[in-house]
Amino acid sequence: MKHALVTGAGSGIGAAIARSLLEQGFRVSLLGRRLEALQATVVDHAEGHHCASCDVTDPEQVSAAFAGASEALGPIDILVNCAGAAPTSPFHKMPAAQWQQVMDVNLNAVYHCCAQVVGDMRNRGWGRIINIASTASLKGYAYVSAYCAAKHGVLGLTRALALELAKTGVTVNAICPGYTDTDIIRTAIAGIVEKTGRTEAEALRTFTDTNPQGRLIEPGEVAAAALWLCTDSARSITGQALSISGGETG
């Protein structure tokens, strides 16, 4: 069975994807900042996984983590870039350091990770790169300008790399979820409640009202799409932005 490496695998969408891959028999390497969170993700799986603490914004840590994953479970066939962060700030109040941090974790980290696997995937004639982008790669949202810019960059990288690799057996796609029921959203809701005095239900509607279905996306829905992109039946799907948003974006 093929070896998949998932970044940001300690919570939310990344954890859901890692668990789904394990359940389907894939060997899975899980990368994230907190080793204990990665281990909790795979607590119900006795084998077939490798966990490594890694700051994906640090190229040296990425190189070491990918080498360790390959040593533990073999060559990496599938890369799922899921690490991300979305701090909020009005643009005119955003410190330059926050802009850089958002670019590093959401865009530059995708480059660092892709650079570790593209050459080997080309040589072996098969590979899957799945970038977890966002509807923020397809439209703008107020107060997360850095995040939108970074995710637009991820989609541009996805499309360009897909064309470069089109004849190699390697596909590159982006999955673009709308607001998803993860810790990021729960933290954002708590922040709205604290700053505005609105109730939790009112704050939640800030996010669900963007979805024509009136709900948050479930992490498992994103995981199901990622699993499909890993299959040979999806070999003609490359350079695409798969929107999972209840109709918010096309």
Image (cartoon, rainbow, N blue to C red):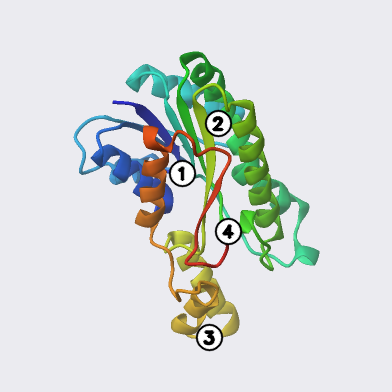
Residue under pointer 4: 135
Say left or right for 162 vs 66: right
The amino acid on which the numbered mark 1 sits, given as a three-letter code, is Gly
User: Residue most toward the right?
Assistant: 92
Image depth: mark 2 or mark 4 in front: 4
Q: Is residue 231 visible?
A: no
Q: Position of residue 247 (x, y in %)?
A: 51, 67
Mark 2: which secondary structure?
helix
The residue lying at 64 percent from left, 64 percent from top is 88
Residue under pointer 2: 113
Q: Earlier in the sequence, mark 4 or mark 1?
A: 1
Say left or right for 97 vs 19: right
Q: Residues within 10 Å of mark 1 (few under 14, many from 20)?
A: many
Q: Earlier in the sequence, mark 2 or mark 4?
A: 2
The amino acid on which the numbered mark 3 sits, given as a three-letter code, is Arg
Q: Position of residue 238 (x, y in %)?
A: 54, 37
Assess whether mark 2 and mark 3 are in contact (beta carbons under 8 angstroms): no
The residue lying at 31 percent from left, 39 percent from top is 21
Residue under pointer 1: 8
Assess whether mark 1 and mark 3 are in contact (beta carbons under 8 angstroms): no
Distance CA(mark 2)–CA(mark 4): 22 Å
Distance CA(mark 2)–CA(mark 1): 12 Å
Say left or right for 140 vs 135: right
Mark 1: which secondary structure?
loop
